[in-house]
Image (cartoon, grey):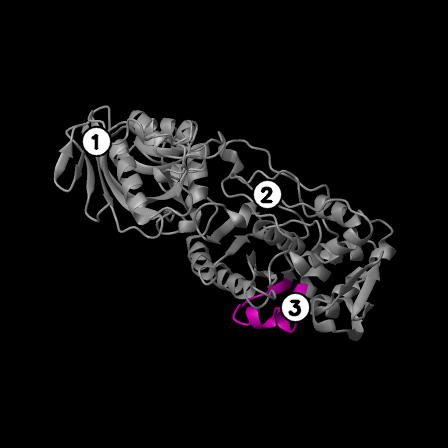
Amino acid sequence: MRSGAKVAMVGGVFAVVVGGVGYGAYNMLDGLSGGGGGTDSKSAPAEVKTGPVTKAEIDEASKKFLKAWASGDPDTASQLTNNAAEAGPALTGYRESAHVTEAVITPGPTVGSKVPYTVKATVSFEGKSKPWSYSSELTVVRGLTTGRPLVDWSPAVIHPDLTDGASLKTGEAAAPSIEAVDHNGKVLTKEKYPSLGPILDTLRQKYGEKAGGTAGVETWIESPDAGSPGKTLLTLTKGRPGKLQTTLDADAQAAAELAVKKFSQASVVAVRPSTGAIRAVANNPATGFNAAMQGTQAPGSTMKIVTAAMLIEKGLTSADRKIECPPTATYYGRTFKNLDGFSIPDGTLTTSFARSCNTAFIKLIDDAKDDAALAKEARDVFGIGLNWQTGVVTFDGKVPEETRGEAAAQYIGQGTVQMNALNMASITATARTGTFRQPIIVSPELDGRPIATASRSLPGSVSQQLTNMMRQTAGWGTGRAAMASVGGDKGAKTGSAEVDGQATSNSWFTGFSNDLAAAAVVQSGGHGGDAAGPVVAAVLRAGS
């Protein structure tokens, strides 16, 4: 296909314009009547061509497909793909469900086996029309049994944001739009704060009607998961948005958005220890999966906050008690070591905590006389795994009850422990105040949802020791460099977690400043203070 060829729909009837020649909507294209076979379900010809598709085949296959799609012939278009069973309904839905009434498709230069194109369409519904533009691409492959060049079908051929099982719809929106504001009344939009996109979509779905809005007419992507919010692609008529107050802080959110952009994959969350109010949530990439609140990864040595709390509560150690920190420690045949094999002669628990000595914590597991003690501490005191009801979908942490070497790995945040930035920010907040306050992003009074509560608080002396150890970590320990720019009463804990298949460990960092706690994880970021530390510090400076 030549650059500049166009596929157009004129006056409500699809037509094709290629090289100045028009084809009517019902004109069958040359060579289509006997040459489809996109599903490879028909009998293969005597000689099946093999090898990579040629440029001529790519041009021909893409041109025929785009012509058939534009001419409103989904049956023919689907037969030009390698999956007609899925392509047919999706192409039919483009007109019947998405209500696209006019379109011009302009292909760009072919790149390998890919043909990019732009779509300038018009969507019409109940007398309302609006232009709609976007870009996508298709790939041409050779049919497995026919040997013919075929469009490699995926929903993204129709729209780049479409995934398996999803569909395009136009109609009255399922939920009224919202005007989300922070706790000070500042408006929050996904354009200004991209990481909030998935969160605002969910808040709209759950609370649009409760916020008093009225629905407009939109084109959206309908997810196959009934519990997932749809993504609005086009607004034909605006409804009246309902005002929804969140617990977020616009300044902290802006700092969080900027901080995570320095890394290809990073997330951060900030919460207020005294209330559990979520002040900031940011991810890079900003769209799609909300890793900050739904991620599931080993948190490394940031987990030592929970481990230290359990050991102190059991009377096995205290912040100022001498504790052994050798280069290595073995438990049930599993050997653990410190970074670069360091040791701390004649040190205390505070020293080992602040310098992140793994072996000091491993050596005390035998004394605990309960392999499941850490799991109980995480659940009963820190609220991990208690089905949090924040207002949006979250993963609430997981510390399974393990035995032997796997239990020891949990002491230093490895093995089967799974956390995300939200969980670790909450753990820091609990250590700070001694009491778990479930994180929230909208008030539970809005919908009467139940808020998780832990079965008990930390004794005051234990909370004080944890807080002081975190202060030392920020003052002269592994968090010193990252927290140097943070003022007020501050504390921190660093962590790194090795992940199978990664050459560099993930960087974890959690800290507090006054009445704000934050935690971050940077994929393949190395040691906690190196990458995740500056992310946390940036948010604490802005929000505390």
Q: Which residue position holds label 3?
A: 473
Judged from the image, the secondary structure of the residue bearing numbered disc 2 is loop
Q: What amino acid type is highlighted by mark number 1?
A: Ser
Residue 459 image offset from top left, x and y in percent: 75, 52
* For residue 276, side relative to residue 162 (left or right): right
Judged from the image, the secondary structure of the residue bearing numbered disc 1 is strand
Q: What amino acid type is highlighted by mark number 2?
A: Phe
- The mark nearer the N terminus, 1 or 2, is 1
Quarter of the image holding residue 516? bottom right
Looking at the image, the residue that sits furthest to the front is 46
The span picked out in magenta is: 470-495
- The mark nearer the N terminus, 1 or 3, is 1
| Camera-side residue of 242 and 256 | 256
Q: Which residue position holds label 2?
A: 395
Comparing marks 2 and 3, which lies closer to the viewer? 2
Residue 172 shows up from this direction: no
Q: Which residue position holds label 1?
A: 129
Residue 14 image offset from top left, x and y in percent: 20, 30
